[in-house]
Image: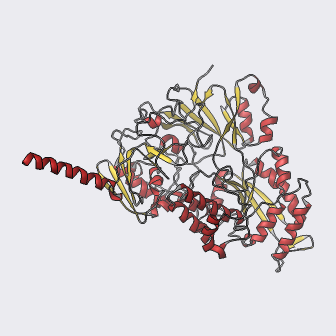
Amino acid sequence: MRPALSRLTRVSALCFLSALAALPGFAQPQHGIAMYGAPALPPDFVALPQANPQAPKGGTVTFGEAGSFDSLNPFITKGQAPGAVSPLTVETLMARNYDEPFALYGLLAESIDTDDSRSYVEFTLREGATFSDGSPVTVEDVLWSMETLGTQGNPRYAAAWKKVAKAEATGPRSVRFTFAAPDRELPLLLGLRPVLKKAQFQGRDFAEAGLTAVIGSGPYVVGKVDAGTVISFTRRADWWGRDLPINQGLWNFDTIKYQYFADPTVMIEAMKAGTIDLYRESNAAKWERDYDFPAVTSGEVVKEEIPHQRPSGMNGFVFNTRKPIFADWRVREALTLSFNFEFVNQSLNAGKLPRADSYFANSELAGDVAAPASDAVAALLAPYGADLLPGALEGYALPQGDGSEANRGNIRKATALLEEAGWTVQDGVLRDASGTPLAFELLLANGAADAVSAANIWAQSLEKLGVKLTITTSDSAAYKERITKYDYDMIYNAWSLSLSPGNEQTLYWGADGVTTEGTRNYMGVGSKAVDGLISTMVSSKDREDFVTSVQALDRVLTSGRYVIPFWYSDVSRVAHNSALHHPERLPLYGDWLGFLPDVWWFEAK
């Protein structure tokens, strides 16, 4: 009888454990995670679909960068660090597949575990993961990195860390984060946090900028550094992660070098001379007109257009609504009317680029912001009626000019709006009731050539309104300091947005950024509707509800008239050395993160 009872007990125990595993609190560790549904790649995938596992290793690639750098710590507010430091030398617990809207797969972590409501996340580290100095990546490093970045790092890390109620080691290789409230995106955000070596910063101020390289576990280490002008990265022969499926076909160059230029217009000449190997041309007219130089005709340089399916994002002249002169939406609308987009676009781009009439144009997330809101979107906007500006519900379309330089129709409309807002022309100068003139400064970073050209054209239109525009250009360090403190009237900025926007939207336009320095809420949005819709968006449990909430947010931002929008392109225009190659299979996001230099390789003729 005992053997039979023993078998029955074992079967019952297995059934009980299976039932527990099906409960939210007893989820099973997985190889990956997606924002919605399951990740596309199976546990036994051998490489990312956009990578070439047979790509040859070797060679050197040299890129050009605008500006300069004075720090090698990209994770803090102080200083200006090269953007390549983080992706090349530092790793995260999970790695993103840019052929999906938002899905992660194990990198430093071999597995991820969370429940259905995503009230916690647990990561199990891989055995054998090491930093570049040979020391192991430990649970203690992970816990320290998460807390330090969240409390002393750049503000972009703070919002997620504030949502963590408890962080603890649950085993020699496992770490668990319990959330103050369920959050669907938070497991993914923590999976993408950089993991740094705790011991490197013992006795040092983490938030202080400097030229000491951060010790990471990534495929490269910092090589030669000429402060502000050149930085190179050397591929690690002893990289612990070279055999992982997520890394097959990636990080193929032996050396990756970045050369910095104070004047970005010099970069194209450097590419023509062979000093740098690649140049992204943002100007469609120049792409057609100026790329017939000898290296192109001989085949040494290849012109390539790389399509993508990502949102347009938003770029243009940004109103700092913290400033009283821009607090009234009618003033912002009037100045938008005075910006002669059609003439500027024709002058700079031969009229070939479409205008960014939505923060999520070129994707399903945009909807039609010029048309009345759908029932589903209107229902989400209804609780915020008092917070909405004209156009949010009924539709908001950007002003269109007749293409002429005079732009008389829009100038008349702008004049009427300004008068309605209390601004009238007195002795050729636009003034308010107290006699204060409408004058402001446009702060631009050195090298923002298109923005400078557009501003010069716009200044002539503003003169017709009696408005004085002062254009100031600044070097990268001074510019960064001013925008960190929101010390400007207006700037030019570009926000790149993904197919899966989430908690980072709070960093871009959350109300805390009105006063908290160092966010990307450059326009000073302080809107209950924006904050509420971001919360709705990140808590959505299916793709349909998520898209509806993004479309609602898009309408509030667009009708808020916070930016005078420029143009966008649905292709990247890249001229590169013919020895540089990439797989034929392009990722969903195209020429974006995860593509260059990640999956490219060097192979001379």
Residue placed most toward the observer, 114 or 336: 114
Marks counted in the figure total: 0
Residue 219: x and y in percent read 47, 36
Residue 125: x and y in percent read 36, 45
Q: Which quadrant holds the C terminus?
A: top right
Residue 570: x and y in percent read 70, 44
Q: Is residue 214 visible?
A: no
Identify whether 453 is placed above or below 539. above
Residue at image coords 83%, 58%: 400
Is residue 439 toward the left or the right of residue 81 in the image? right
Residue 220: x and y in percent read 49, 36
Look at the image and name its color scheme.
Answer: secondary structure
Q: Is residue 146 visible?
A: yes
Residue placed most toward the observer, 549 or 494: 549
Q: Residue furthest left?
A: 1
Identify whether 579 is placed above or below 98. above
Q: Residue furthest bottom?
A: 434
Is residue 116 toward the left or the right of residue 283 in the image? left
Is residue 141 toward the left or the right of residue 516 in the image? left
